Image: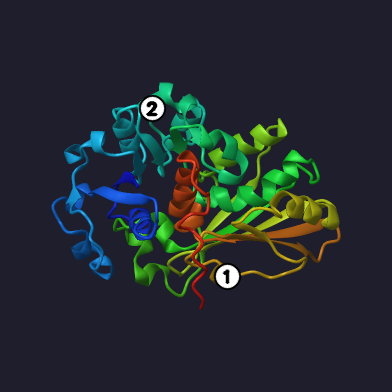
């Protein structure tokens, strides 16, 4: 058994880490941190999990890092970097914040508005888009998980730009995401009466996940590709559905995606012209992709859906951790979707 600590366990992604790791046959939760709820029983914070034998929540400074093999860090950006920078170097770190997703400290300041706390560490982290960086993740002790919106968009787009089967100048992503993507911290914009019975765009000019699109599209195409990205807030708890418009040949696009993912356990390319829903992947580590004809003869519509808290975050983190410990990549993650 590998002993792990979950930092920021009282948030939504921390909760999903606890839930999934509690069923994992090779990982054992040794420490849970939640500074604002330090000293509390985890079952008092989340009564639905009170039946589990879990350690009480501690502050980050109370954890004995010499006793653990890995840290899952689900803390806010900047706070995460400072803590990770001071961890023992033999511990495997899977960071779910944005602190180490970008390769450049200049880009980090541009998108996050502050200087990076430890810019020298950026080059040490592997970007956690598992299906594209698998071989690097296997030999790394430091992995930075992707943004949930980034993952939903990159899975269908990266194979197409790397094989140059679409027009790089006309990529449009309209993405709708559940409210849990904003985290558990109280905010007027995400309370029930503000979100329910409505559907609204947000951050249309400078969403921070655009930085990941810029970086990864360049890495896989060698060109600076700027997509048009419009995120929307869905009146539901979880799930992302990306609607992506590209210029290219329908059959070439489908064949490229099918060939890329036909042997992947967690990425499903659906039959041509299949309409998909966030309900199809809810509560699972799967991402479904569909290629569809559109009303315009030279435009192809791609749909991509995943659970933002699992394949877009905590499930992805565990998938990466499995690789880092030389375990079966799917261990603890094959729970089927919850429907309806």
Look at the numbered disc 1 and give the secondary structure of its residue: helix
Look at the numbered disc 2 and give the secondary structure of its residue: loop
Q: Of the residues under marks 2 and 1, which one precedes in the sequence?
A: 2
User: Quadrant of the rendered structure where residue 142 is?
Assistant: top left
Colour scheme of the picture: rainbow
Does 252 appear above or below 223? below
Give the percent coordinates (x, y) of residue 251. Answer: 84, 57
Does 147 appear above or below 43? above
The residue lying at 29 percent from left, 39 percent from top is: 68
Query: Is residue 15 in sight in this rendering?
Result: yes
- In the picture provided, is 185 more to the left or to the right than 140? left
- In the picture provided, is 201 more to the left or to the right than 196? right
Give the percent coordinates (x, y) of residue 93. Answer: 39, 37
The residue lying at 59 percent from left, 57 percent from top is: 266
Give the residue pinned by disc 1.
Answer: 280
Neighbour tally class for label 1: few under 14, some 14-19, many 20 plus, Cα within 10 Å: many
- In the picture provided, is 264 more to the left or to the right than 114? right
Give the residue pinned by disc 2.
Answer: 115
Give the percent coordinates (x, y) of residue 50. Answer: 23, 67
Does 193 appear above or below 203? below
- The label shown at residue 331 is none
**Alpha carbon distance from label 2 to label 1:** 40 Å
Circles 2 and 1: CB atoms closer than 8 Å: no
The residue lying at 55 percent from left, 40 percent from top is: 212
Nearest the eye: 224 or 199 = 224
Give the percent coordinates (x, y) of residue 181. Answer: 43, 56
User: Quadrant of the rendered structure where residue 56 is?
Assistant: bottom left
Q: Which residue is outermost to the front?
A: 1
Query: Is residue 204 in sight in this rendering?
Result: no
């Amino acid at each position: 058994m590998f002993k792990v600590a979950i930092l920021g366990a009282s948030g939504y992604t921390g909760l999903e880490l606890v839930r999934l790791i509690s069923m994992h046959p090779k990982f054992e939760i040794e420490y849970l941190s939640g500074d604002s709820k330090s000293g509390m029983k985890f079952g008092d914070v989340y009564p639905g999990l009170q039946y589990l034998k879990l350690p009480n929540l501690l502050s980050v400074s109370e954890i004995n890092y010499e006793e653990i093999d890995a840290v899952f860090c689900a803390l806010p950006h900047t706070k995460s970097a400072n803590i990770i920078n001071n961890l023992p170097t033999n511990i495997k770190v899977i960071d779910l914040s944005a602190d180490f997703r970008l390769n450049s400290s200049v880009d980090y300041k541009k998108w996050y508005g502050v200087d990076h706390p430890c810019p020298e560490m950026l080059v040490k982290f592997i970007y956690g888009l598992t299906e594209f960086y698998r071989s690097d993740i296997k030999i790394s002790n430091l992995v930075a998980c992707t943004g949930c919106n980034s993952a939903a968009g990159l899975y269908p787009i990266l194979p197409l730009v790397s094989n140059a089967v679409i027009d790089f100048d006309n990529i449009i992503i309209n993405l709708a995401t559940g409210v849990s993507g904003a985290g558990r911290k109280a905010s007027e914009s995400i309370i029930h009466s503000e979100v329910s019975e409505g559907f609204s765009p947000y951050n249309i000019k400078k969403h921070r996940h655009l930085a990941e699109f810029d970086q990864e599209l360049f890495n896989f195409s060698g060109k600076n590709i700027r997509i048009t990205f419009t995120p929307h807030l869905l009146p539901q708890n979880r799930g992302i559905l990306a609607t992506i418009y590209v210029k290219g040949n329908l059959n070439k696009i489908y064949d490229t995606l099918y060939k890329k993912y036909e042997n992947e356990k967690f990425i499903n390319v659906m039959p041509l012209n299949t309409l998909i829903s966030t309900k199809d992947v809810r509560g699972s580590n799967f991402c479904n992709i569909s290629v569809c004809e559109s009303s315009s003869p030279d435009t192809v519509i791609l749909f991509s859906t995943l659970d933002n808290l699992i394949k877009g975050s905590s499930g992805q983190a565990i998938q990466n951790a499995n690789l880092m410990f030389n375990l079966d990549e799917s261990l603890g993650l094959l729970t089927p979707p919850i429907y309806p």
